[in-house]
Image (cartoon, rainbow, N blue to C red):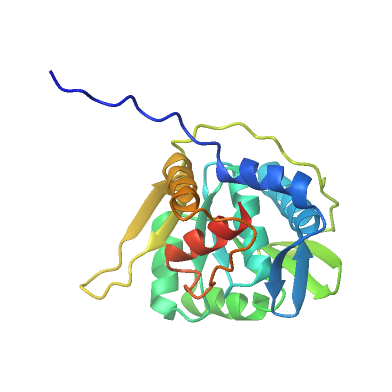
Amino acid sequence: WLNVAPAAPPQPLLHTVIEDQVEQWADHIAAEGYGISLRYRELNSYANQLAHALITAGLTTTAVGVYGDGGPLQVVCLLAAFKAGVIYVPMSPEQAINRLAQVIAETGMDTVITTHMHYASLKALLQAKGEQVGRVIVVDGSVPQQYVIREYRHNIENAPVEYSTENPGLSYNGDNSAYIFYTSGSTGHSKGIIGSHAALSHYIHWHRSEWSVDSSYRISQLAPVTFDASLKDILTALS
């Protein structure tokens, strides 16, 4: 007979772990760069507003693009996607326009989140390729400490809405898809790689445990946002 070790219990989903960290480290810096500095409570509050916007739009379990090049606002979008149960699909202005069009078409996304710095670039991309994206949500951090969510439906800005800053507390299966990253396509056609919340949580918890990560660590943030290693860098540091 084989002696098989019992399966390890599932780890808590990462956005809930970060919410617990907010309680402990509310006034500590969570993300900094691009002229923006966010404490844990600010990161969580802003991500909650964006998550509520996504939930209100009925986007849970659907693919949602995040068009940007990193920084604190990218982290806000990632955390909001997990809180809302949408599938995080990172895209970058550095990617070839045909690759971006492929990602939009193959994932069937109808919503793209971007920042105030990249809205014009995204709008030009969509117009150039004739891509049909019904909703663009702009995370606007142009005024320090004043973060605004702007929503455009078919290039027309909706009236501003104030969303809750409370944790959504949405319950969903850990086997749900968390993200889609596209391969470089160096061997041919680029392919989408899907990962679940449970698998990502297991990996990040293992990584933190294996390396005994604590608040004294400094973790590099060098991986491009379109490379899945960026999740390890961001989530290991925040959780």
Picture quarter with the N terminus: top left
Taking the spot 56% from the left edge, 62% from the top edge, the residue there is: 234
Taking the spot 43% from the left edge, 48% from the top edge, the residue there is: 203
Q: Is residue 183 left or right of residue 142?
A: left
Taking the spot 59% from the left edge, 75% from the top edge, the residue there is: 122
Q: Is residue 220 left or right of residue 71?
A: left
- Percent from the top left, x then y, of residue 61? 52, 42
- Percent from the top left, x then y, of residue 34? 69, 79
- Percent from the top left, x then y, of residue 168? 72, 39
**Whether residue 222 is situated above or below residue 42 in the rendered picture:** below
Q: Is residue 85 left or right of residue 202?
A: right
Taking the spot 43% from the left edge, 51% from the top edge, the residue there is: 210
80 or 31: which is nearer to us?
A: 31
- Percent from the top left, x then y, of residue 236? 54, 56
Q: Please indicate, yes or no, whether residue 106 appears anywhere in the rendered image.
A: yes
The number of discs equals 0
**Whether residue 43 is situated above or below residue 117 in the rendered picture:** above
140 or 18: which is nearer to us?
A: 18
Q: Please indicate, yes or no, whether residue 135 appears anywhere in the rendered image.
A: no
236 or 213: which is nearer to us?
A: 213
**Whether residue 62 is situated above or below residue 181 in the rendered picture:** above
In the rendered image, the residue lying farthest to the left is: 1
Q: Is residue 140 left or right of residue 189?
A: right
